[in-house]
């Protein structure tokens, strides 16, 4: 039995060494790029450390078949099983090396990992052959053959343990099957955490090339293909010719005024962005919620500019991040933030502020691995990113991470030490199930039935905001700061709206701070909009161009389009001042329609055109 276990461990070591060696070759091949970016040597070495966890998970997947071979060899051990193991490993090694060789050749042009997108070019082999350079192609071919032959030789002579004449003990076979399979399951999902491992685990640097080097190419390609297997090269939401759809969308964003009110006293204020987890408009009294759930937010409105008709563009946090920072709306079936090859083509207003000399930071009390958020946040090039592992471990935590009051106060304390101007974003956590924020001796809101925990968690976050602002007002930077509060998405509430309704997806958006001109404090903006509009609304106030964000409109421009869009799993909600439609393409079914009959066809066509063009934009990135 020890020989069996030794064989499995040696095969793990083999794959980890292969992954590390290929990573080294990649770094050497693109050493000039690394040199031009002035990356410190210790940060380059960190690539191998941050790669390890995803490498172990990938090695586990590669070793699934050898595991079954070894299990059978605990019961009987003919030599042909050893031969089969060698053949399988040689084939798997060839596939892995082929993936990396293709990536080596494409990276200079694409600057991304190999992804499902590459398969869309398989129908144009002649173009690929014509565009490939002969010299590098020959070198890569020689490298592929040489590494495959060399790898097989090393595996056969130094890492492969032949299993012959094993003494059969059923109890040993049973223990091996149970214990080893459990351990491999843990390794494959990256540990005991609630969320399985993904590419975010390897992202650690502001330098994209190091993050790409740390991310296992086989894992990345498999995940990319798995997530997009049904939509590799087709748009499932086509309803009309693009010659009809695109002008409709262009018209929605075409109306712009030359006179946008200036609401700030400074063009280069500090910005604190507070992204509230799952805050529905039903939590906000002014937006139609019951009084008493978020009393501090309500008091803040008296000195703020409140947008009262704003909707989340999707129902998941990772979708919200792209909507907020890149002005890119959510879409059904997937999210652009889980595909590094796609979001690297997105604009980011964090990048723009970095160029303007802003210090930028992002805070989250939980694990940013969820929805691949971490890799997207690092793509935004925040100077500092703090998640649960970066906080004092003594801070009180729940199942998902550190409670909101402590992350907020940590950010406030940190901002006392950084240069101005700055952008600091914080994503709250406590209003996410299981709502295990610190419980008061007596429940504050003893109503809400099955949503009682949710509304009490919102009350807790609201009071955490109160403590944060009390601390912020004592700081020197407060007088130069614009605070923006927005939700990542909505949540089911005591109203029990269906997710397919616009009312379900309504969220708060509020501007507050000493830099807000007095005449705009206590003002409500009644302009129908959605989350991505934050970008085009904010940037002109900073005297910055927002034209890079074509899916965003300025909510302070009274002439800009009045519409909102929200995606759900396989459909969308489209809202106009005259009403809303909610449509699911797969079923050809309207869940909700409050649009007057005379306008139904045109409004419905608008919504379908919006999703069609948006999804095509996503596909082509």
Image (cartoon, rainbow, N blue to C red):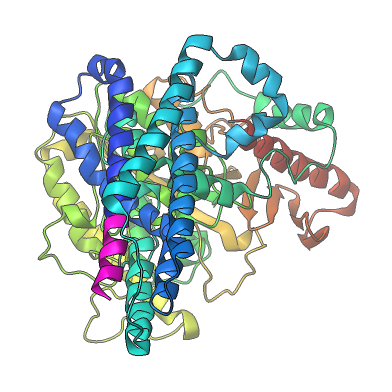
Q: Quadrant of residue 28?
A: top left
2 within the magenta span: yes
Residue 301: image location, x then y, percent: 38, 52
If the image is split into quadrants, where does the N terminus sit? bottom left
**Quadrant, the C terminus:** top right
Q: Is residue 31 above or below residue 6?
A: above
Where does residue 504 sit, x and y in percent of width and height?
59, 63
The number of numbered discs placed on residues in the rendered structure image is 0
Task: Name the foreground residue: 220 vs 7.
Answer: 7
- Magenta segment's dominant SS is helix
Q: Nearer the viewer, residue 494 or 173?
A: 173
Of residue 390 and residue 153, the one placed in the foreground of this image is 153
Residue 438 spot, x, y in % from top left: 23, 75
- Height in image: 347 above or below 311? above
- Give the residue drawn at x 55%, y 57%: 506
Residue at image x 26%, y 69%? 3
Against 484, residue 349 (above or below) is: above
Check residue 478 for magenta coloring: no
* Residue that protrudes farthest toward the bottom in the picture: 171
Report the front residue among 1 and 272. 1
Query: Could you say which quadrant of the image residue 538 lies in?
Result: top left
Can residue 94 be seen here?
yes
Q: Is residue 488 visible?
A: no
**Residue stretch rendered in magenta on the structure:** 1-12
């Amino acid at each position: 039995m020890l020989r069996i276990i030794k064989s499995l461990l040696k095969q793990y070591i083999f794959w980890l060494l292969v992954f590390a060696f290929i990573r080294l070759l990649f770094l050497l091949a693109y050493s000039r790029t690394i040199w031009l970016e002035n990356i410190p040597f210790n940060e380059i070495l960190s690539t191998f450390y941050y790669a390890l966890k995803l490498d172990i998970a990938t090695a586990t997947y590669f070793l699934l078949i050898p595991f079954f071979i070894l299990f059978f060899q605990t019961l009987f051990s003919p030599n042909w099983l050893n031969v089969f193991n060698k053949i399988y490993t040689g084939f798997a090694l060839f596939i892995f090396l082929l993936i990396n060789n293709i990536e080596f050749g494409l990276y200079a042009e694409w600057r991304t990992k190999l992804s499902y997108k590459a398969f869309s070019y398989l129908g144009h082999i002649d173009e690929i052959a014509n565009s490939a350079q002969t010299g590098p192609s020959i070198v890569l071919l020689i490298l592929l053959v040489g590494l495959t032959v060399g790898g097989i030789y090393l595996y056969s002579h130094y890492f492969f343990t032949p299993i012959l004449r094993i003494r059969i003990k059923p109890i040993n076979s049973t223990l091996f099957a149970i214990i080893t399979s459990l351990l491999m399951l843990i390794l494959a999902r990256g540990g005991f955490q609630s969320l399985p491992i993904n590419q975010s685990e390897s992202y650690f640097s502001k330098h994209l090339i190091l993050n790409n080097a740390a991310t296992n190419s086989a894992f990345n390609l498999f995940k990319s293909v798995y997530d997009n297997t049904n939509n590799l090269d087709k748009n499932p939401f086509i309803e009309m010719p693009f010659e009809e759809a695109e002008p409709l969308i262009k018209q929605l964003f075409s109306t712009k005024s030359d006179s946008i009110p200036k609401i700030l006293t400074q063009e280069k204020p500090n910005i604190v962005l507070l992204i509230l987890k799952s805050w529905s408009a039903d939590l906000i009294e002014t937006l139609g919620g019951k009084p008493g759930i978020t009393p501090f937010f309500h008091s803040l409105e008296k000195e703020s500019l409140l947008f009262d008709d704003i909707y989340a563009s999707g129902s998941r946090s990772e979708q919200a991040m792209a909507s907020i920072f890149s002005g890119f709306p959510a879409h059904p079936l997937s999210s652009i933030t889980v595909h590094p090859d796609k979001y690297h083509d997105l604009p980011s207003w964090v990048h723009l502020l970095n160029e303007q000399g802003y210090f930028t930071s992002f805070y989250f009390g939980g694990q940013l691995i969820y929805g691949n958020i971490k890799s997207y946040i690092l793509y935004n090039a925040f100077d500092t990113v703090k998640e649960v592992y970066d906080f004092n471990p003594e801070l009180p935590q729940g199942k998902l991470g550190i409670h909101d009051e402590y992350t907020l106060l940590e950010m406030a304390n940190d901002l006392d030490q950084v240069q101005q101007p700055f952008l600091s974003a914080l994503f709250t956590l406590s209003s996410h199930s299981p709502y295990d924020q610190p419980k008061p001796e007596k429940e504050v809101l003893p109503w809400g039935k099955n949503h009682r925990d949710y509304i009490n968690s919102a009350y807790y976050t609201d009071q955490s905001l109160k403590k944060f602002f009390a601390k912020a007002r004592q700081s020197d930077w407060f007088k130069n700061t614009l605070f923006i509060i927005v939700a990542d998405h909505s949540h089911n509430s005591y109203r029990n709206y269906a997710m397919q309704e616009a009312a379900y997806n309504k969220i708060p958006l509020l501007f507050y701070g000493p830099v807000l001109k007095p005449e705009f404090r206590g003002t409500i903006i009644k302009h129908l909009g959605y989350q991505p509009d934050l970008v085009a609304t904010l940037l002109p106030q900073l005297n910055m161009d927002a034209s890079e964000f074509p899916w965003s409109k300025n909510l302070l421009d009274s002439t800009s389009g009045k519409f909102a869009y929200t995606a759900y799993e396989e459909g969308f909600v489209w809202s106009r001042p005259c009403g809303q439609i909610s449509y699911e393409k797969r079923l050809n079914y309207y869940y909700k329609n409050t649009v007057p009959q005379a306008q139904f066809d045109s409004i419905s066509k608008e919504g379908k055109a919006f999703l069609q063009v948006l999804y095509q934009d996503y596909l082509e990135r």
